[in-house]
Amino acid sequence: METDKLTPTKNGNTLNGFSLNDIGDDHLYTGLETPMKPDAFKLSDADKKERISILFEEIMDVMGLDLTDDSLKGTPQRVAKMYIDEIFSGLNPANKPKIALFDNKYQYNQMLVEKDITFYSNCEHHFVPIIGKAHVAYISSGKVIGLSKLNRIVQYYAKRPQVQERLTNQIANELKTILDTNDVAVIISAKHLCVSSRGIKDDTSSTVTAYYGGTFNTPEKITEFQNHINS
Ligand SMILES: [Zn+2]
């Protein structure tokens, strides 16, 4: 029975009467934009790394780890650098891929599918990995973009604390904006380590999300897109 999970908590740390712990485990999704503070970029990347390094050292210290040990002493700096320069670099709009558009000289006007784009993201509720594959498609409205740019757009939005629904919609939204068309589709299939390695500990389940815009939102185009992915 799941009902005991739904008991509202007494303190103020709730949303719609449910504890934030329970909501995190249920991976509730609140909107298209990644929730950021207005002053998110007041600190430079270098300053952020210094602050995170100090704070992560404190987390390790509180857990009782010996920060003078040769193996551990560089960890706070490594984590800070990894957060800012790598796994969460997509939070900073300065790292957004620059996309050049080209005229559709080939007169190709069917769907273009870029499939099996492997990505690594992190669950924003637990800060553990989400590992998945994204399949994206568009039908040109007159402009085309380089194929690798489709991969880069996926990677940019993946490198944030994420929920899969938002990642799907952010990629779709970016493609719609860049390509100036609603005719885009995104399917993401991913494994969430917060589900497989902890919590419910289900190692076999995966999560699938989809976005079908414009002419993609018809049974024929959905079938065609899915056939391309499975081919
Ligand atoms: Zn999670």
Image (cartoon, rainbow, N blue to C red):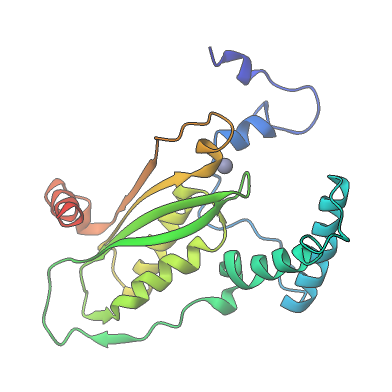
Q: Vertically, is 144 above or below 13?
A: below
Residue 220 horizontal side relative to residue 8, left or right: left
Residue 173 horizontal side relative to residue 141, left or right: right
Say whether residue 73 is visible: yes
| Nearer-the-camera pick, 102 or 153 | 153
Q: Estimate the x, y position of residue 189 in percent, counting from the top left.
A: 36, 48
Residue 73, picture quadrant? bottom right
Q: Estimate the x, y position of residue 118 in percent, counting from the top left.
A: 38, 61
Residue 161, picture quadrant? bottom right
Q: Residue furthest top?
A: 1
Q: Vertically, is 70 above or below 58?
A: below
- Quarter of the picture containing the C terminus is bottom left
Q: Residue at x 72, y 66 (%)?
A: 80
Residue 74, picture quadrant? bottom right
Residue 55 horizontal side relative to residue 163, left or right: right
Q: Vertically, is 22 above or below 73?
A: above
Q: Residue at x 87, y 53 (%)?
A: 66
Q: Vertically, is 6 above or below 176?
A: above
Quadrant of picture, ligand 1: top right
Q: Estimate the x, y position of residue 18 in percent, counting from the top left.
A: 66, 27
Q: Residue furthest front?
A: 70
Q: Estimate the x, y position of residue 10 in percent, counting from the top left.
A: 79, 22
Say whether residue 40 is visible: no
Q: Residue at x 34, y 71 (%)?
A: 150
